[in-house]
Image (tube, rainbow, N blue to C red):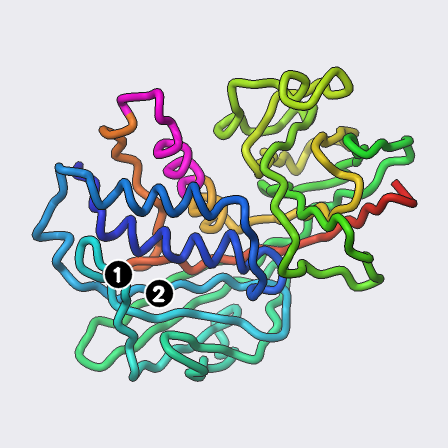
Amino acid sequence: MMFNASNANQSFNFILSTLYFHLYTNSKQMKHLTACFGLFLLLISCVEEVDIESARTRKIVVNALLYMEPVQKLSLTYSNALGDYYYDELEEATITLYENGNEAGQYHKTGYSKWELDYTPTAGSQYQLKVEVPGASTIEAYTQMPPNAEVSKAAISNTAYRKHLIQNQAAQPYYIFVMNQEGNEITANPQVEADNTLEMHVGTNHPQVDHFNMQDESMQSLWGSDFSTMEFMAYLRIEADANEESIPFYIEGRLSHCLVFIRTASQEYDRYLKTSLQKMLVYEAFDDDTQWFDENDIYSNIPNGLGIFAAYNDQTIVYNEIEN
């Protein structure tokens, strides 16, 4: 199978908005991954073995992540030509969201390629997205809003670099990531601010952590003798087991003043985020010549098109310098 650079360009453009701006409010900026993603987009335009005919085929691109907020957002564009990072929008479309087979509402256009729906999903419900574009085949995609993983602070003394947690229950995979808020006052209703940064070096002793993004270095070699785990790049993916008893564990990193996100993923979001990170890791591996032969695709569940329709459910745990 040939790597389609145009499709990867389109998918990673959405990953930029997903990983940077959709972590909590879907509208905030983060800085540390910009160079990696920019380099990825530069490199894929240099791949020689590209299916040119496929790359020239213009497809409808739908990107929508449901989350537990009162406004749901969606982008609707056409895929672009190879090396072109400007995307034509679709001006006319009927976009309908269904919950458990019943119409929940229709998205309305709010800006260039941007659509919104005033609606708050329900955990456990099944969702269908229906996109009708004049002159094109109807697009239908499906997902389910996952329940929150039950993860909380453990009654164990913490430090600025290690936080103890306990997983009481988790029915499906979830991701842990950290937003550093050094210098900011964390309020009762915390949110990601424009100057917050995604903690790129994290570790854990959780027995069910997925090793797909584990790095070669240990946290100890990176930060010093106070650390004891291996380093993971930005995200800790936890393989959940609904039958598992409570699991005490800790995470490591620069955690003195931060928000720890516990993001439960739908099956579609899990596959999408994991394959997106795997693709990024491939293009970070400068000392690995086999990176140029990587044929892993970024997961999509949009038939006759590109993009993703998925759901996630966030829980936020707050830490500050006073109360660790």
User: Residue drawn at (58%, 62%), measured in percent from left and top?
Assistant: 28
Q: In the visual, does 102 lie left or right of 250?
A: left
CB under 8 Å between callouts 2 and 1? yes
The residue located at (29%, 48%) in the rendering is: 8
| SS label for mark 1 | strand
> Which residue type does callout 2 highlight?
Val
Residue 64 quadrant: bottom left
Horizontal placement of 240 versus 48: left or right?
A: right
Q: Position of residue 56 (x, y in %)?
A: 12, 57
Q: Which residue is mark 1?
A: 305
State the residue lying farthest toward the left. 53
Residue 286 forms part of the magenta stretch: yes
In the picture, which quadrant includes the C terminus?
top right
* CA neighbours of label 2 inside 10 A, class few (<14), some (14 to 19), many (20+): many
Position of 79 compared to 244: left or right? left
* Disc marking residue 62: 2
Q: CA distance from mark 2 to mark 1?
A: 8 Å
Residue at (40% x, 57% y) in the render = 14
Q: Residues within 10 Å of mark 1 (few under 14, many from 20)?
A: some
What percent of the width, then of the height, locates residue 173? 58, 41
Q: Which mark is residue 147?
A: none
Picture layout, residue 152 above or below residue 66: above
- Seen from the viewer's position, the closer of residues 23 and 61 is 23
Disc 1 marks a residue whose amino acid type is Gly
Please state, as top left, top right, bottom left or bottom right, where the N terminus lies in the image: top left
Question: Considering only vertical position in the picture, is 194 above or below 212?
Answer: below
Q: Earlier in the sequence, mark 2 or mark 1?
A: 2
Q: Residue at x 34, y 42 (%)?
A: 40
Which region shows up in magenta?
275-290
Chief secondary structure of the magenta portion = helix
